[in-house]
Each structure stands twice: as C-alpha cells, then as structure tokens.
Image (cartoon, coloured by chain):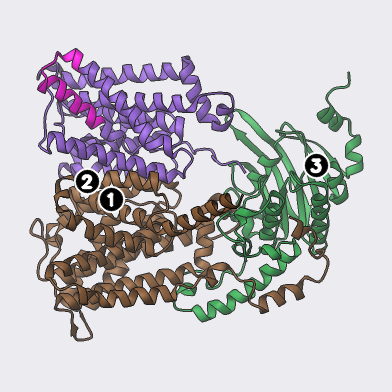
Chain colours: A purple, B brown, C green
Amino acid sequence: MARFIAILFSGIADGAITGLIAIGIVLLFKTTGVVNFAQGDLLTLGAYFGIWLLVDLNLPTGLSYVMAIILSFGVGVVVERVGYAPLRKRPLLAIVISTFALSLLIEAVIGLIFTNTPRTLPSPFGSGVWHVFGAAIPYQDVLIIVVTIVVFLMIQGMLQRTTLGRQVRAVSSDREAALLQGIRAGRLTMIMFGLSAAVAGLGGLLIAPILSASPTLGFTLMLGSFAAVVLGGFDRVGGAVAAAVVVGVAQQLLAGYVAPNLNEAYPFIILLVALVFRPEGLVKATVGVRY
Amino acid sequence: MSVTESGPPASASPLTSASEKLAARLVRPTVYTRHQGRTWLAVTVVAALVPLVVTSGYGYNIAINSGLFAILSLGFYFQFALAGQFSFATPAYYAVGAYTSAWVSTDHGFLLGFIAAVVVTAALGGLTKLLLARSPLIHFAIATLAFSGLVIIVLENWTSFTGGDEGKFGIPPATLFGYQFDTQTKQYYLIAGVALICTALLLLFERSPAQRDLTFVRDMGLVAKTSGLRANYLQVVAFAAGAAYMGAAGSLLGATTGFVDLNSFSSAASVSVALLVLLMVLLGGIGMVWGPIIGAIVLTVLPQVLSSWQNYEQLVYAIAILAVILVLPGGLTSLPAEFRARRAKRKQRAEQ
Amino acid sequence: MSVFLDCKGMTVRFGGVVAVDDVSLSIDSGGEVVGLIGPNGSGKSTFLNAVSGLVPARGRIEVEGRSVSFGRPGVMARNGVFRTYQTPQVDAELTCLENTLVTSPDLALRGLLGAWPLRPAMWRREKGRWQEACDILDRVGLLDRANRPAGGLSYGERRRLEIARALMAKPRLLLMDEPAAGLNTTETGRLADLLSQVTADGISLVLIEHKIAFIEQLCHRIIVLELGRQIATGAPKEVWLDPAVMRAYLGEAV
C-alpha cells in the first residue's frame, strides 16, 4: 500500500510536469494552429535559468524563481519572433521544422554554456518528506502538484474571464473571422508564446530538484506531453492536463510493477499507442479547411 | 479568358480536335515532356570521374559518406517532398537496415543481406505509415519521433543482436556475383552506383501516374479522399519506398566499413542523423531530385573543410535549418530559377 | 427511371446545434436534376458534406437499393456519386490535364509497377487516359489550357476544371455545391448548357444554387431547407408559391 501511494504520488507529480508543457502546447495550438516542438526545451531552459540564478549567482530563492520565469517569457517571445512570425504565411510544415530547429538550437546553446554534465537545483524544502499511510512523499512532489493546479486554474480563468482569453478562444474557433474583427494576431501570438514558455520554465524549476537537469531533459519529457495532448485533445487545456496525469501515473505504475528496466521506453510506447488508437485525439477535430 | 470564350462551342464534335492534338503530341502531362535523362547521364559521368581527383583514403571516406547520405536524403525526399510526410524516423530505418543486412550477409552473402535490408525496412516503413494512416500531418511527425526513439532503445537493449557498445563486427565486404568490392575505389563505385540507381528510380517515379495521384493526395487531402483516390495506399507505398532507400543506405554502411555500432544512429546522434538528413534535403531543395544529392555532398564536405565546427555542430546545423527555411525556402536548386525570375522582372521594369 | 440515391433522415449535429435535421432526398438515375435551395446557413452544404463523409452524420443512404456505409470519405465516390465544392478545389501545382486525370476510374498501373517495371504497358494505358481527359477538357472548354498549371486559372475556369475532374470519374450522380456562384452571365449560360448536356448523357445532378433562373432552367424538382429542416419540396414553379418558402426567403408578412 505504502509503495502504491508513493508510486501514485510520483506519477501525479510527473504528470503535472508534463501537464505544464502540455498547457503551453495547447495554448499555442489554439492561437496559431501550430505545434511547438521547442516547448520541451523551454522547460530545460527554465531549469537552467534557475540553476544559474540560484546556484551560480547565489540569489535568493524567490527572486531566482521570478526572474527565471520572466526570462523564460522573454525567450518565448524571441522564439515567436524568430521561428513563427516570419513564417506565418508559409506551409504548416515549415513552421514545425523551424520550431524543431529552435529546439535543437536551445539544446545546443545549453550544452555549450553548461556542458552536458547533469546539474541539480536544490529543492526549497530540502529533502523533506510528508508521511501518508506509511509512504514518504517528498515535499517537492506536493509542491509540483499544488503549483500545477494553481497554474491550471489561472490559465482556465484567463481563457474564460479575460479579454486575452476571449481573443484566444475566438482565434481558435474561427481564425479568419476573429482577425477580421480586429484582433491583433501578432501581439496575441507573442504573448501566448511568452506565456507558454513561462509555464514551461516554471515546470523546469519544479522538476530540476527531482530529475537532474541535462540539455535533453525537456525534450524527453515533451514526448509524454505529446501523448497527453493527443489523448486529451489539442484544443482543450483541461483535457490535456488530465491526460498528462493519467499518462504520468500509468508510466510510474508500469515502471513500478510491470517492467522497471523498460522505464525509458514507456513515454515512447504510450505516445505511439495513443496515436495508433486515437489518431486525432479523443475529440475528433472539426475539419479545419472550408470547402 | 477571351481565348476560351471564343473557343468552339462545347456541342461541336469534341473528339476530332482532341484526338488531333493528342496525335500531334501536343497534349500530354508536362511531366512527361521534362526529360532528365541527360542530366542523369552527366551526373553519372561526373561520379565516374571522381576517383581521378580523389586519391587519399581520407578523400574516399568523404566520397563514400556523401554517397551514403545522398541515398538517405533521397529516401527522405521520397517521403517528404513527394508524399508530403514529415518523419523523424530516418535513423530508425537506417539502423534497422544496417543490422538486418549485417546479420543476413554474414551467412548468406552481401546481395541477400542488401535485399533483406531493403525488404525489411520497406515493410517496417509501410507498417509505420499504415498504422498511423489516420494521423494528421503533425501527429504523424510526433509519432515517428516516438517510433524512432523506441527502435533505438530496443536496439540498445538487444545487445545479442547489435553487439552492444562494441558494435557488430566482421560484416563481410560487399560482393556481387563473385566480384569483391574490397578497395575503397570499388566501394565508392558501388555506393555511387546504388545512389544513381536510386536517383533514376525517383526520376521515373516522378514521371508516372503514381506521382500525379500522390501529388494530388498530398496537396488536396480530404478532397482527394472524397474523390475516390487511393490516398492511403499511395502514401503507404511512397513512405515504404523512402524507408527502403534508408535501409539500403544502412546495408551499404555495414558492407563498406565492416562493422556497425549504435553510435552511427543512436542516442544524441539519433537526432543528429535525422537532423542532418533534414538539413541536406532542405538546403538542396525539395523542388527536384538533385536537391537532396547536392545537399548531401555539400554537408558532408563542408564540415571536413571547417573542422573547427566539431563542438558547435548541432548549433550550426540548427541555425542553418532556420536560415534555409527563412531565407532560401526553395533550397540551392531553386536558385537558378530564382535568378531567372529576378532578371526577367528587372528587364520588365527597365522596359517600363 | 429508378431511384439511384436515397438519403433518409440525415441528421448532423455540431455540439448542440442541429445543422441538418432529418433531411431526406432521393434522386432518380438517368439525368434527374434536383435543386437544393435555402437561405444561407440552412444546412445545404453540410448536407452534401454529410453525404460525402466529410462530417459525421446519422441517417441511411441507399444507392440503387443497396444500403451504403457512408461516413468515410471516398465511399460515395466508389458508388458513383461525385461532388464539387463551393470554392473550386483544384491542385494549383498540377496542370489542368493532370487535375482531370487523377479521378480516372481506370486504376491499372498507377502504382509502383507502372512507375518502374511495367513502363511500356503503363504508357499504353496512359495514352487512353489522356485521350479521355482531353475529350472531357474539350467539353468544358479547357483543352487549350490542358498543360497550364491550374494555379493560373481564373475562378470560372477552376469551376469548369473541377467539373471536368468530376466527369472524368464517370459518375452516375453529381452533387454540385453552388456551381454558378461567382460566374458572370455568359459563364453561367455556358455552365447551364454544359450541365444540360451532362444530364442528357444520363448523369443525375443535385444542385445547390442561389440563382433562381439557373435553377428553373435545369431542375425537375426542388427541395427547400431552412435552419436544417426540409420545409418544402416540389416542382420549381410550385415551390415558389409555397407560403413556408416565401416566409423563409422574404420574412414574415408585415
């Protein structure tokens, strides 16, 4: 029982992190119709920003976190300006390839500055644990889960209540009509890229104390997020986060009870199975082209 | 518009005029009038003359590598440019082809090994596309990313098959009907020959009804499906053919170097092979078959010349992909047409 | 003449909106022309999309008395039912001839075999197909554009090219979504001539159209939709007098 609860919690925490990446993917898909392959690397970047500010520059924890998130936001905006804005009128694949190139670029830059040796970020709670039913749950896991819930609620609130959110929903349901209504697409996509990057960066800050940071950290995690987004729907934040948690728990259960030695293969298998059986996600996307 | 308006009324006997035009060979799809045979011959002659220039073993390594990457890029071109399928799975087919060929050729000789590699990778490629037939473009790209990663993980863990970290040794050098390709010159000719055959097959495919239907499926998507075209069949076939090219390259890799290890395809490098091939095809241009070949040669030779790139390889490639997409979307092979268009425009302006 | 296509109780829902509500349509083989009219947003195009498998729908479709499992694109094409679209769908990169050739029902040697080992046989087969496509292009008045990329065509020419592609498939029934939209008077007249020839050849038509004269010239029967529901059906002259139709088009009498 204790083992099960421990596995369950770490699964939910893993799922929460992939969920944070997934939120960014969904937000961008809603506003631009494009899948950003650099989303995972923005998480890596967040983790390294944290390490740089907190460990290397020795700044206070809170300040480092805030600055790391702001920096991530800035990188997101740069990604939009370089990899998306100039290509907006070009075929979808051109944009996908450019985000993929940006992903490699970010990875390469991190590798050059921080080398490929894994680094860790200390948890704000040290190595403290919380005892539930005999299971020892690291406080960091609890923090991840709580923060993800808060972020999710904030994003939902933003989408439902604010002008910005209404614009996102309008663009996502009928792009041309929305743009004709005078929504400034350039500004909107810039903010959304920044926001997605900030959310991913936050994920990096949260996961770095558990998994050590290496340049490919985010790219690997992103595969789980893709599975979540495919299962939960490319245009549903709630669905994607829920699916991310399911994927995270499934992964931990498989690793814990079925075959631990295949651990690294599970994200790939889950993603492939999801795509083979749910080729268009759980909710069939409506035909995007008008005939 | 005016030409059509004044044309014969639709009720006039259409048969005669159409047949006449056809008889005069006026009306046939333009692809059939664009002959590439001479270009192909010229390239063959150039390829045959390469050993006159290349003398060192080092030079041959570059030439052989260019050939291997040309075949890989042509496979990617088949999948990406012709079938419109963006896949990250290039390293997977390359690796599977290499190991299949390595095992079969050890006991049954190179030719069977090569054929086995082609057949197995074609089947694997067809299966990938078939299982994901209903996945839209981006979903498919993501799925191949996962597929490629999974294949590499399987190979990493299946050490009895792959020889683990040391790799699989003792792959017999290529022999065809008793003729041994045992020197670097001979190996170069083998690989250049296969690359040229791959090119010829692609040229023939581009001048065939299959490519016409495939283009329509690629560009029109659902409209093609509702029009009753065999969309899935065509895309599966084209994707499988591309995968088979990659498998062939894998087979040749083992047959020329004598061993294969996962470092040629895997871990960090797994992104690298996929990335490199993508860059080759983009740089050369997806407008015609010669694009990927030029891209492959340029990107095999350049890093050798600029050896100080080593540490910045991924960075340079990533920036290069971005630059090509942003500045030169048609690739190098689109440059002549671009210059011509620009000159025509300038002339037009001058006349005005 | 017998019933060729029989759609019963077609219903399409988008979320909570019922876009097509229990619409039935049957059409005879051998050149019957049925008009499908209604104000914008009445579900005409959605109905066609449902029949051709582009949007999920409920209902029953029979072709010549056989029940057809519709819902996947391509099924109706294989049953001899072809369609054109509101915005003409042509591949800008392919030439007019190629755009026509793709729907040829003659599928022989159009895969790898024809591309590689059996090229001579493929050539012979292709020549027959070119001939056919040229005849059809001639019929729609595009033969002199046969080798031009479809991307350079005018709007009206694209429409005709789309019709050529549909005719190439040798359909028994054509579903046409506003074929005359965006055409000038001359072009509309030519289109009407072309379509009456098509029906004379025994191809039946379902026409979605707004141009009244065009409808009256061609249609034997009209079905009127409003807000997804069928509100009237009958011969053109009678339908206009139907009070429900007048209300739908002109609004309530003040």
Look at 23% across and 30% down and name the residue there: A45
Q: Quadrant of residue A150?
A: top left
Give the Cα separation between the discs numbered 3 and 2.
Answer: 63 Å
User: Of circles 1 and 2, which is in front?
Assistant: 2
Residue A85 vertical position relative to residue B210 in the rendered view, above or below: above
Q: Quadrant of residue A77?
A: top left
Residue B107 vertical position relative to residue B138 in the rendered view, above or below: below
In x, y percent, where is residue A115? 12, 37
* Whether residue C73 can be seen here: no
Amino acid at the residue labelled 2: Gln
Number of residue marks: 3
**For the residues bearing labels 3 and 1, Cβ distance under 8 angstroms:** no
On whether residue A48 falls in the magenta region, the answer is: yes
Part of the protein shown in magenta: A43-64
Q: Chain of mark 2?
A: B
Look at 41% across and 73% down and name the residue there: B39
For label 3, the SS is: strand
**For the residues bearing labels 1 and 2, Cβ distance under 8 angstroms:** yes
Please determine if labels 3 and 1 lie on a single subunit: no
For label 2, the SS is: helix
Residue annotated with mark 1: B275
Q: For mark 2, does the 10 Å Cα neighbourhood hold few (<14), some (14 to 19), or many (20 or more) residues?
A: many
Q: Chain of mark 3?
A: C
Please give the label number shown on residue B22.
none
Residue A78 falls left or right of residue C231: left
Amino acid at the residue labelled 3: Ile
In x, y percent, where is residue B11? 83, 66
Question: Along the line of sight, which residue is nearer the eye, A39 or C158?
Answer: C158
For label 1, the SS is: helix
**Which secondary structure dominates the residues rendered in magenta?**
helix
Give the Cα separation between the discs numbered 3 and 1.
Answer: 57 Å
Please give the label number shown on residue B314.
2
